[in-house]
Amino acid sequence: MNTREFSTKNGIDERLIKAVVIVESSGSGFNIDGSLKIRFENHLAIENHPFLSKWFSIGSPVWTNHKFRYPSFSNKWRDTHTDYFSEYQALLVCQSQIGLESFNYCSMGSFQILSGFHYKKLGFDTSIEMFVYMSKSQENDLEVGLRFIESSDSLIIALQQRDFYRFALLYNGNNADVYSERIEREYNRL
């Protein structure tokens, strides 16, 4: 299903879906090298595995100022969210400590879906399965993103009503004021 079919089926202005993708991933779920866009969420990894604070740091509020360092003799802290390479480096550091569970702490693709919270309701057995499926094509990435929105009547209603704030609050939670303004700005631009 493409965004037009999804929008028609659910009574949503297609520009809203496109605006969400622009805000969440700059309009594409894939990096320039073809890898799936991810955002490694340091705060969630530390929350679930406190010992990881040796390799990851967070700011206040916890979703800011994310840093990581390699488990090696070098203790140099590096910013996590500088580019796609830093996201994958942080994921690799986490994998070295807790294995494939590290994918639970990644937001993925065009819609930046937090895999660890949502992979089961989206039909996957694990977050790595979701990652692999989404990585295969733009169609798969889009399918999972639209399935995610469709899995919540509240998200659908917020989009139908063009309630940017409510959508941002339900979708992202953190910084709903900022996200709703960005989505509305992109929607109006489109």
Image (cartoon, grey):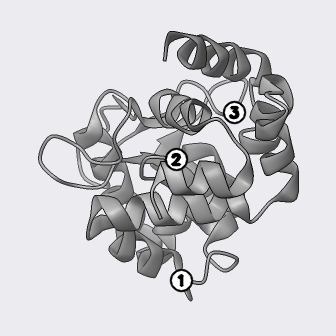
| Left or right: 84 in relation to 7 | left
The location of residue 43, given as percent across then percent down, is: 63, 44
Find numbered disc 2 in the image and state the secondary structure of the residue it sits on: loop
Quickly name the residue at label 1. 126
Q: Which residue is mark 3?
A: 62
Depth order, front residue of 169/99: 169
For the residue carrying disc 1, how many other residues have a C-alpha within 10 Å: few (<14), some (14-19), or many (20+)? some
Q: Secondary structure at mark 1?
A: loop
Q: Are marks 2 and 1 in contact (CB under 8 Å)?
A: no
Residue at 46% of width from left, 29% of height from top? 22
Which of pointers 2 and 1 indicates the residue nearer the eye?
Answer: 2
Asked whether 41 or 163 is in front, the reply is: 163
Residue 57 seen in render: yes
The amino acid type of the residue labelled 3 equals Val
| Residue 49 makes an appearance in the image | no
Q: How many marks?
A: 3
Check the image and report above or below for 138 versus 3: below
Q: Please, which residue is most extreme toward the front here?
A: 8
The residue that appears at 50% across and 10% down in the rendered structure is 189
- Cα separation between marks 1 and 3: 25 Å
Three-letter residue code for mark 2? Phe
Mark nearest the camera among 2 and 3 is 2
Q: Is residue 156 above or below residue 9?
A: above
| Residue holding disc 2 | 111
